Amino acid sequence: MGSRVTFVKKEFFHILRDKRTMLILIIMPIVEIILFGFAISVEIQGINIAVVTSDMGETVRKIEEKIDANPYFKIAGTFYSQDEALKMMRVGKIDMILRFPSGLDRKILSSNHERKSVLSASPVRIIVDASNPNTAVTEQMYLKNVLMSCFSGEGAVAAYGITSGISFETSAVTPEETVRGTSAVASSGTASGMIGGTPAGTSGVASIGHEGNVVPDIRLMYNPGMQSSYNFVPGIMGMIMIIICAMMTSVSIVREKENGTMEVLLVSPVKPLTVIISKMIPYFVISSINLAVILLLAKFVLAVPLSGSLFWTCAISMVYIILSLALGMLISTLVKTQAAAMLSSAMLLLLPVIMLSGMIFPIESEPHFFQWISMTVPARWYISAMRKLMVEGQQLSAVLPELGILSGMAVLLISVALFNLKSRLE
Amino acid sequence: MGENAIEVRNLTKRFGDFTAVDHISFTVGKGEIFGFLGANGAGKSTAMKILCGLSLPTEGEGTVAGYDILKETESIKKSIGYMSQRFSLYDDLTVAENIRLYAGIYGVSDKEISPRTDKVLANLDFTAEKNTMVGSLPLGWKQKLAFSVAVFHHPKIVFLDEPTGGVDPVTRRQFWEMIYKTADKGITVFVTTHYMDEAEYCDRVSIMVDGRIEALGSPSALKSGFGANNMDDVFQKLARKAERG
């Protein structure tokens, strides 16, 4: 018994006296959480937009004001011709062009009398720099939303007392293309009022508007502010835990092999299991500290709600930590040098965790083959469980499959690692 | 059993087609200093692993410290000490912490550890270095300390695997004095080495070639038997016959 305590103490000494590694272990998660939570955001801000109009009427000015007031957009200038604006886009000064047809005020007024859709002949056109297709789609969606609220929201109603329909024509271009390219999304759509105006109904249920149009009432569940940190925090947890645990355990075991101390331990009456478990305990403690730090940062700095059971969030995380430690143990039985241990844990883990865990890229949109592979990536199950618990606030029953799979994987990894360790000694 | 520290008969270890150890038989008496010589690849390490209870022989039988090498490996591990050719203490632990760790592993009681540590350190003239990190000690000191740690729990047999590799002649000399003192206490010393002058210090030596023991006896008997002036000549004559290595 006494020897086991000294053994664990020895492992703590190894870690505590290696100041640099200690620092990495404690600082890395904090830096990554903050980096991914703040700096790396999928939201697009500061979109430079150029307005093209031949006559500056009341409506256009109101819309410009509204766009400029929006934190996502910045009006980069107003032009009389589309060609001038396209030149600006080609040199990268602007991201989008919004072109209004002439005589917009007059048309809106007349449509008010006739109560029918306007502008079908000369639509408002959105031209997007689509050299980055993802941003282009997002940008034009943002702008459409702003425009719709202009034509339907309180501002428009107050100013004109009307609810009018408007059609948009969106084109996506790259700076090299002067000709309008094919549209990025459904290029034009007719939307009539209501979007910003109707009181929220049941989510996902479309209500019938005045003129018989179907108007979807959209409600964003779980993450109403569309905060990307909600999505990233579970992902980062899944990545950091497995890499820290696996890398550190494997390196620490292999270091003993390299130094020759493992030989002495094997000759001694100490059971290999004791050696391994004593190695896992300090890393388990450190990872638990990391977990606590990450959860605190998530809650108080990134404002992720942690709406589910805190107990189960921690419990599942600990299963995941044990699994990762076992993975490190397994790696250590397969390699001979610390460098190999470090490389194989980084290479073996980093890419699958980033690509196949759903951390950044949704698994559902990957080819079937990769979806199958992703089933074997522990991080996938952990991240899914954490999203359900932390963000969606679901009950334990919702994450039971993930908990089961993770526990199963942990048991499997420990058994394989122990078997490997034993057969290595023979 | 009884009288001898180590007894093996027809010990054989095969890895697939390769026979690393080929039917070796020998005995080592209590308190004897037994030199286990052989070129690299002759099968010394494999044989030593079997004797230490780390691996099981493919064929053959034997006892170490009175325990069966096939069935009682755990008991063997408790009765032996081991020092490896590579340095085997933890650099990032202090002298006292290293001793404490290994003493604990071999089941020395907590009450005994402290006074015994002081005694060992006094013998080594190391008392001032008790709380020094082992990593900052010179190699010769580390080796002497490692040896003291290996015999700290008073084992019946201590296995030394090339203990003096890379150590200067003065320290080697001191090291062998420590070995003699240990043997005087009745601890059997089983030592491998590549230094033939060290072979002369042993009570008896065996020389392994291609997995077999080609010569076994006291250094003087071997020298006269092979008509050689020193152990180096004996070794050269035998080792040159080797087909592998």
Image (cartoon, grey):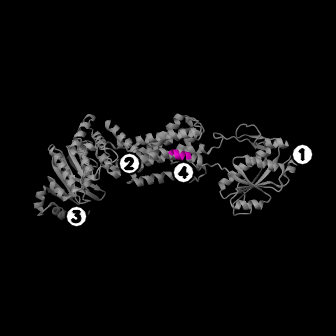
Q: Secondary structure at mark 4?
A: helix
Q: Report the amino acid beneath label 1.
A: His
Q: Earlier in the sequence, mark 4 or mark 2?
A: 2
Local crowd size for mark 3, using a 10 Å CA cut-off: few (<14), some (14–19), many (≥20): some
- Residue indicated by mark 2: A253
* Spatial separation of the CA atoms under disc 3 and disc 1: 110 Å
B214 is higher (above) or lower (below) than A11: below
Quick one: A373 or B43, which is closer to the camera? Answer: B43
- Residue at 74% in and 48% down: A67
Q: Using the rendered image of the protein, determine whether residue A60 is visible from the camera's viewpoint.
A: yes
Same chain under badges 3 and 1? The reply is no
Q: Nearer the viewer, residue A175 or A365?
A: A175
Asked if residue B233 is among those painted magenta in the image, a careful observer would answer: no
Residue hosting label 4: A354
- Overall secondary structure of the magenta stretch? helix
* B86 lies above or below A231: below
Task: Return the residue found at the far front.
Answer: B128
Q: Chain of mark 2?
A: A
Residue A31 in magenta stretch: yes
Tag 4 subunit:
A
Q: Is residue B237 shown left or right of residue A166?
A: left
Dot 4 and dot 2 residues touching (CB under 8 Å): no
Quadrant location, the N terminus of chain A: top left
Side (left or right) of A38 relative to B20: right
How far is mark 2 from mark 3, CA to CA? 37 Å
Asked if labels 2 and 3 share a chain, the reply is no
Q: Is residue A169 above or below residue A295?
A: below
Mark 1 — residue? A113
Question: Which residue bears the numbered disc 3?
Answer: B242
Q: Is residue A171 left or right of residue A270?
A: right
